[in-house]
Image (spheres, rainbow, N blue to C red):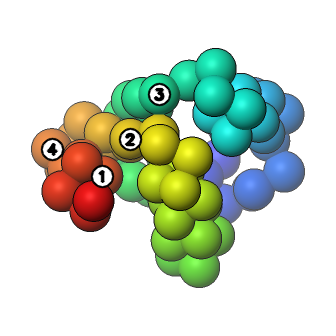
Amino acid sequence: VSGINENRPGLNEMLEKAYNGEVDLIITKSISRFSRNIVFLLKTLRKLREAGVDVYFEKENITSFSMK
């Protein structure tokens, strides 16, 4: 599944669960696998943070924990 396309059923399902409090941590292989659209990425990370969900990007060893 491409990180370019934001209309991905799996991504949308995961985000919906995160926004509904069913998920508190998302682990993804890399930033580019999550999204290659920087605006979408930043907006989504902001919404996830507001929902209390952290994101870990394995390849870059970056977490949204430090964004809090």
Kindly identify which residue carries mark 3. 24
Who's the residue at 38% across and 42% down the image? 55
**Residue at the limit of the structure toward the bottom, as seen here:** 39
User: Going by the image, does 29 lie left or right of 15?
Assistant: left
Q: Residues within 10 Å of mark 4 (few under 14, many from 20)?
A: few
Q: Residues within 10 Å of mark 2 (few under 14, many from 20)?
A: many
Spatial CA span between label 3 and label 2: 6 Å
- Percent position of residue 18, x then y: 63, 33
Q: Is residue 54 visible?
A: yes
Q: Is residue 11 visible?
A: no
Q: Quadrant of residue 30?
A: top left
Q: Residues within 10 Å of mark 1 (few under 14, many from 20)?
A: some
Kindly identify which residue carries mark 2. 54
Q: Nearer the viewer, mark 3 or mark 1?
A: 3
Amino acid type, label 1: Ser
CB within 8 Å, label 4 to label 2:
no
Amino acid type, label 3: Asp
User: Going by the image, does 11 lie left or right of 32?
Assistant: right
Who's the residue at 73% across and 32% down the image? 20
Spatial CA span between label 1 and label 4: 10 Å
Kindly identify which residue carries mark 1. 64
Q: Earlier in the sequence, mark 3 or mark 1?
A: 3
CB within 8 Å, label 1 to label 2:
yes
Amino acid type, label 4: Asn
The mark found on residue 61 in the picture is 4
Q: Looking at the picture, tell me which residue is in the foreground, 56 or 68.
A: 68
- Percent position of residue 1, x then y: 67, 37
CB within 8 Å, label 3 to label 2:
yes
Q: Earlier in the sequence, mark 4 or mark 2?
A: 2
Q: Earlier in the sequence, mark 3 or mark 2?
A: 3
The mark found on residue 55 in the picture is none
Q: Quadrant of the C terminus?
A: bottom left
